[in-house]
Image (tube, grey):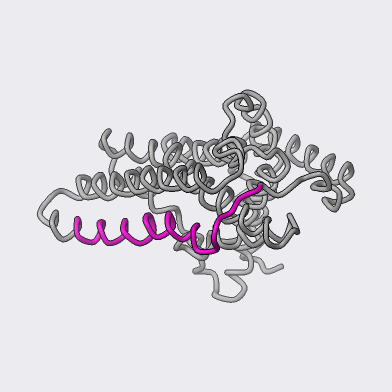
Amino acid sequence: MTPETTEHIRQFADQLTKTDIVVTCIGISVFIYWLTRTHFGTKALTHSRPRRNNMLAFMPLIPLLVVFGIAPLAVTITEKLLTSRPEWQLAFANTLILCCAAITGAVVTLVLAHKFFSRRLKGFGLDAKTIPEDAVFAAVNLIATLPLVALAVLLTAAIGRFFVGPEFQITQHKELESIIAHPQLPVKIVIVITAVIAAPVFEEMLFRGMFQSLLRSNLQRPWTAIIASSALFAIVHADSSHWPALFVLAICLGYSYEKSGSLFRPIFIHALFNALAVTATLTQ
C-alpha cells in the first residue's frame, strides 16, 4: 500500500461521523448475516423464478434509445440555442430535458411491459400491495450495501492512484456538481426531482425490469442475469471512475428484484441512495 493510498484512507476515515460509523457497522453485520444464511449467496436465489414474458431481444433497446439517444441530442441543441443565457438557466434546461426524457422512457417501458409480460404490470413487478414491505426491505438492503459501495470507491481510488498517479481523482457526478455550481432554487428542485424520482424509476424499469428479465428468461441463471444487467447499468454512465461503485450498487438492485419479484424494491433502494448523495451535497 502506497503512502498516497494510506493518506487517502485516513482522510476518508476522518470524514466519517458517528452516524456513518454506526450505519456502517449495522450494514456489515446485515451483510455477514446474509452471507451465512445463504451459503455466501449460492442459495440466495434458489426459489426465484423467471418473470414470464414474450419480449423480443431488441425491445429493451427502445426505451434505452429514447433516453440515451434523443436526450443528448436535445441537450446539444439547447446549449446552442441558449448560449447567451446565464449558466444556471442552461443547467436548469439541460436537467429538465433529462427529467422529461426519463419520464418518457418510463412511460414507453410501462407500455412494453403491459403488452409483453404475463400478468401485465404485476408480472413486471409493479403491484401496489407490496409497497409497504418493499419500502422497509429497501432500507435494510441499502444499509447492507453502503459499506460495499464505499469499499468499491476506496479500491477505485487506490488502483487509480497506483496506475495513474497521485493526481487521479474520482470525479463528482455531473448533477451534484451542478447543485454546487448553481445554487438557484429552480436548479435544485429539478435536479432533486430528476435524481430522486425520475431517474431511479426509469433506470430500474429499464435495467432490472427489461434487461434483467430478458436475460433471466433466456439464460435461466439468476446471478448471470444480475451481473450482466449490472455491468450494462454501470457502463452506460459516462464516468468510468464511477463504474465499480455503480456495479456494486446494481448487484444489490438486481438481487432485490430477483429475490422479491417486485420492481418497487430496487426503485426505492435507488431513490434512497440518490437522495443520500443529494442531501450530502446540499448540506456541505
Rendered location of residue 106, percent (x, y): 43, 44
Quadrant the C terminus occupies: top left
Q: Camera-side residue: 29 or 206?
A: 206
* Front residue (pair 99, 146): 99
**Residue at image location 61% in from the left, 50% down from the top:** 53
For the magenta stretch, what is the residue range?
52-78
Instruction: Point out residue 191 in the picture as x, y percentages from the top left corner.
Output: 36, 41
- 98 displayed left or right of 228: left
Camera sees residue 94: yes
Is 66 rendered above or below residue 21? below
Q: Main secondary structure of the magenta part?
A: helix
Which image quarter: residue 139? top right
Query: Which residue ends up furthest to the bottom in the rendered image?
Result: 163
Q: How many marks?
A: 0
Q: Residue at x 73, y 42 (%)?
A: 259
Image quarter where the N terminus lies is bottom right
Q: Does the magenta stretch include residue 67?
A: yes
